[in-house]
Amino acid sequence: MKNNRYVIPDHTTGVRIKGIRKKLNMTQKEFAEFIGVSKPTIERWETQEDGITGPVVTLLEILRRNTKWVEQLSIPERKLKLRLFYMYEDMVCTIIDIDEVSREVRIQNYTDNVQYRAFGIITEPTYEDYEEFIESRCMPRTRDKLKLELNRLGVPFYDPILIIEKTEGRMADDRFWIRLER
């Protein structure tokens, strides 16, 4: 056991790695992508007879105890035209899928902290909730000298998505931002 402070083994084995990968129903390539190593590393580990040490031991122990993590961290299949990743620094907080024509909005939250979620406690936002959120990540429509600011950004008219394409929805003294995927 590591340090006697945590119930984590000192090492793991290729058999355990393969067992957890199989339990997660992942190929070697999928498992490699999930834990951030190459497929050849997984292949080598799974055939290795010596003990395997390092951060992978802790990660495997966590996955062994809670296989639902993979599902909780999975990105849903994109079914609508526009996808926004609402981020806090480098952490995905909420994925927002939108179809502006049908006014459909679907979200997936990746944090339990409602202060980090795009829509707070709202789990099924309306299109109006989306419009309010997206405008909150831009300059207000009523901003003084709005046309000058839009011109500076190279945006022909007030459109929150066009503004976010230029600014990533970043605000002063704010670590939240938006990544667009069309």
Image (spheres, rainbow, N blue to C red):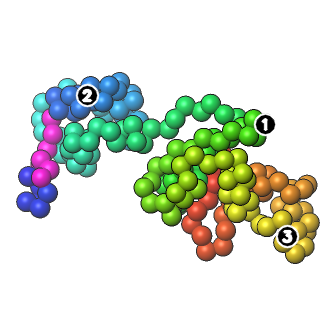
Cα–Cα span, label 3 and label 2 = 55 Å
- Does 1 sit left or right of 19 as displayed? left
Question: First in sequence: mark 2 or mark 1?
Answer: 2
Query: In the rendered image, which residue does mark 1 sit on?
Result: 101
On whether residue 52 falls in the magenta region, the answer is no
The location of residue 137, given as percent across then percent down, is: 69, 62
- Crowd around label 2: few <14 · some 14–19 · many ≥20 (10 Å): few
Q: Is residue 26 above or below residue 138?
A: above
Between label 3 and label 2, give the one nearer the viewer. 3
Q: Which mark is residue 23?
A: 2
Q: Closest to the observer: 83 or 32?
A: 83
Q: Point out the tag, 3 or 2, that comes first from the N-terminus.
A: 2
Mark number displayed over residue 142: 3
**Residue 69 placement (x, y as % from top left):** 34, 42
Question: Helix, strand or loop at disc 1?
Answer: loop
Q: Quick check: 119 above or below 30?
A: below
* Mark 3 crowdedness (10 Å alpha carbons): few <14, some 14-19, many ≥20: few
